[in-house]
Image (cartoon, coloured by chain):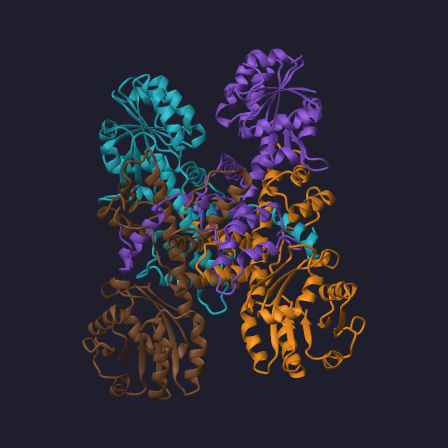
Chain colours: A purple, B orange, C cyan, D brown
Amino acid sequence: MQLGLVGLGRMGGNMRERLRTAGHEVVGYDPNPDLTDVASLAELVEKLAAPRAVWIMVPAAVTEQTVDELAGLLSAGDIVIDGGNSRYTDDLPRSERLNTVGIGYIDVGVSGGVWGRENGYALMVGGSEEHVERLMPVFESLKPPGEFGFVHAGPVGAGHYAKMVHNGIEYGLMHAYAEGYELLSKSELVTNVPGVFKSWREGTVVRSWLLDLLDIALEEDPELASLRGYADDTGEGRWTVEEAIRLAVPMNVIAASLFARFASRQDDSPAMKAIAALRQQFGGHAIHKN
Amino acid sequence: MQLGLVGLGRMGGNMRERLRTAGHEVVGYDPNPDLTDVASLAELVEKLAAPRAVWIMVPAAVTEQTVDELAGLLSAGDIVIDGGNSRYTDDLPRSERLNTVGIGYIDVGVSGGVWGRENGYALMVGGSEEHVERLMPVFESLKPPGEFGFVHAGPVGAGHYAKMVHNGIEYGLMHAYAEGYELLSKSELVTNVPGVFKSWREGTVVRSWLLDLLDIALEEDPELASLRGYADDTGEGRWTVEEAIRLAVPMNVIAASLFARFASRQDDSPAMKAIAALRQQFGGHAIHKN
Amino acid sequence: MQLGLVGLGRMGGNMRERLRTAGHEVVGYDPNPDLTDVASLAELVEKLAAPRAVWIMVPAAVTEQTVDELAGLLSAGDIVIDGGNSRYTDDLPRSERLNTVGIGYIDVGVSGGVWGRENGYALMVGGSEEHVERLMPVFESLKPPGEFGFVHAGPVGAGHYAKMVHNGIEYGLMHAYAEGYELLSKSELVTNVPGVFKSWREGTVVRSWLLDLLDIALEEDPELASLRGYADDTGEGRWTVEEAIRLAVPMNVIAASLFARFASRQDDSPAMKAIAALRQQFGGHAIHKN
Amino acid sequence: MQLGLVGLGRMGGNMRERLRTAGHEVVGYDPNPDLTDVASLAELVEKLAAPRAVWIMVPAAVTEQTVDELAGLLSAGDIVIDGGNSRYTDDLPRSERLNTVGIGYIDVGVSGGVWGRENGYALMVGGSEEHVERLMPVFESLKPPGEFGFVHAGPVGAGHYAKMVHNGIEYGLMHAYAEGYELLSKSELVTNVPGVFKSWREGTVVRSWLLDLLDIALEEDPELASLRGYADDTGEGRWTVEEAIRLAVPMNVIAASLFARFASRQDDSPAMKAIAALRQQFGGHAIHKN
């Protein structure tokens, strides 16, 4: 089918390629003239036959404005798909705004990173049955072959919601491996830490894609000596814990993973300064001065 | 090669079968007459040509006594292999006891459960280079084919150590999925929770064998309505956190996973009774009486 | 000085009494005719000489509407004080709304509960230097005598912010005692658990007002047998963790205390059902059926 | 009454003074000739009339050896008191060793630090009714006046157990304040952080001795700029969490406080290196190189 695609960066560019390979007609727009197929959003809309479908794949910071621009160019019966990392709470207001002029809205959580072009992108989709139905040819081509890698999770918002939880879980998984790595690396007994991770890749309960990646990383740098223990966090981890608070879900593991990232970015810990101050006050405990 | 195998339960029995299929001569002993090949440990030892190798695959509670019995029957140059779930701290004393009479010792952490017979068992091995070398034919047949599923992790104790950390990581991984499941199941937006898990099995960062299992479980019982939220814990989870304490490794994620299992087995929480008591005292807050 | 006081429940009623005892002229309004001094907010405003100060002490749910009603009755130069449990993020918008008609705004976090009338209320105040100055006679009478129990924490919002953090800390403190209580209560060695808490009230590092309350509770009910381990959470605990997420502050302790309250209100844990399901899948582990 | 006191450092020296002020006859021994009353343990024992009571107040590392030396010098009917920071699991074996030669044993957890001499030491005591009875005159003089500051917690071991839990709680309390401090210090709204802590010292739920100390520390150094966020941990915190694991007590708060101390002593976090490695592998995320 025919699809407009806004945003042709690492993700969008690869998706365009995968869709074209599958026989779809993709009209892509990007502000970067080296990447774009058309000169403007207006031209993109012109090139598509109604009823149109336009997939937005831009950084979260400019999604809202892109949706608004498209709203002014599209017509009743068209559909906008947001495949970026929007917070799920943005989806319903956005959808309602578009609906007032008869434009449909679908939110899609997209996973797959740099491997997606070849292996397919996992798609978590929110929207009406009717709109999702119309886009199925595109979803079918983007997703990995087989029964996995696609879900119509619920109404508008459910796609980004499922992707948010996916990323929250990812935080917890990564940190479980990370704690195990640290323990092994401190053990006096285990002399072959990278070998232990490699051994786990088959026949164990902990085998996973993340484990495979950690094995690859340890093969390149067995003591991770080239890296600093520093990690940014993206919005989804924070949103997951905030949503747990809203819904009164105990979430110690994912929250601890998030907090560990916060701590990794501190030169010194104000909280631990307070601990040091207290220990100095009550016991004359040894403290470390700046 | 020739191997004595003590303990022919679910694990040991399947391992005997896998080893025989691979052409090894296995003499098995089990107190259960329906399972055993020989009438006693003494007969097992007699049937093996020196230098012998005897693999112990019995419940942790009787490992020590089995090792001691074997020590009285075996000769200098023989090797004892413990493939059970011993705590790594038991390995060195055991090894030293055997060494005084010239018997070697290898510890092996074995993973694979009921799938191991067909797919192979992941093996984490601790012991001397020489002893591990001698057992390699057996290890090769037990492990999954290919480059994964086996490591000589270090000297005596390192095998059980690596298996302990494996299980600790497993606690954290499971709990990360569990928290995500709870959040999804409480969400007002996501109407197809099992579908979301299924979608993650391809193309995502969180794909893993545990995820596959959770998908299967949700297919059978989409709301897990038949289960109670109750989980025992085996020794390895506790040992992992204790070892983290010994080595001063921050371990919030795995510890939280362990504590959640403790909490799952309580009818009521004494700690939360204390919270309720405090709230009653200071604010006349509503409390729930027994 | 003269003060209007809206809301004469447990807190507001006691504050009126404390202020009158100190010689202030308080005009109180409450929808409950048994408590109120005047028939309406309008009458309350009439009875006060300009420039007026009106202190709102109503449930959070009706604060916004009370502020709006007052905005229609008061004049430029008057001041509204919110002493309720508002979220700090509500203060600035509210203040700006009032400022457009020349009315000032102060937010006050009030602590002290049922003991406040006699011992004084701790006051955490946010607002301009000028407005706080004008209200100082009232603050002086409400607060406990001496150098403690009052702070001008910063501009509008800082008072509720400080109170929010106060309550977050309170969650952590309570849970630290609660965990210690549970451990003692399970110990085979300690036969006099209430006595241990009593012993800590003097000469120890852990002495505190909360400890005093726990001692009193244990004196009444040494095994807390009459209580269920159930605790609601008020907004401040959640807001504290959300604010920690916003500012990237690691907050494992307070978050764990909050999550424990969530868990205390669950009949069964969906997360632990997922754990049980996984254990059933991979190992044939014993599970508990509903 | 007459008491032998072994170890006259900061704690023991002050206790000797407090006991003498109360009219007791104290014979003190310390390897430091400037502090000691006698030249040897043997002379100390000689100077005491049977049945003797000897209180040991030495570093944990030399307690065992001191007990053994005393065992060779004392007679049946004498009592040894260990007031040091022994692990409770050491008490019963020690007691049984002494009992075989008719010597009694009492364990005492002592709190109070540098303030103890003036205000009294909180004492948590384990031992038989008869032995505790005999020592009551000493306990009465060491403890703070009034009904608090003393408990006979249970049989041998219960005193150190109660002290262990006391210190575990202390970790949690300190960290709750510390997290609140960090949040306040990062807030854009609160301009007077030390003032907020000072305000909490009267009339609030969070008032405590630790809060008083934090206020004093912030008065001296309002931004704690002179301190590094570094804290050692003593055995009791670790033992508390290990005991929680043994007794299956969920202990997220105290464990998190302990782990935060571990983290405070790391130059870089191996666990976060693993996180960074994973992020680099799967997403080309920005990483920080060493």
Q: Residue B189 at what x, y percent from top left?
A: 61, 31
x, y percent for residue A105: 61, 21
| Residue that appears at 64% across and 55% down | B148
Quadrant where the image shows the N terminus of chain A: top right
Residue lying at the far right of the rendered structure: B34
Percent position of residue B205, x then y: 59, 41
Residue B287 in sight: no
- Up-down relation of residue B76 to residue D122 (above or below): below
Closer to the camera in the image, B117 or D59: B117
Depth check: give the residue in front, C158 or B200: B200
- Vertical comparison of C207 with D130: above or below: above
Left or right of D33 on screen, residue B175: right
Q: Residue at x 29, y 38 (%)?
A: C18
Q: Quadrant of residue C125?
A: top left
Q: Residue at x 29, y 47 (%)?
A: D201
Residue B94 seen by the camera: yes
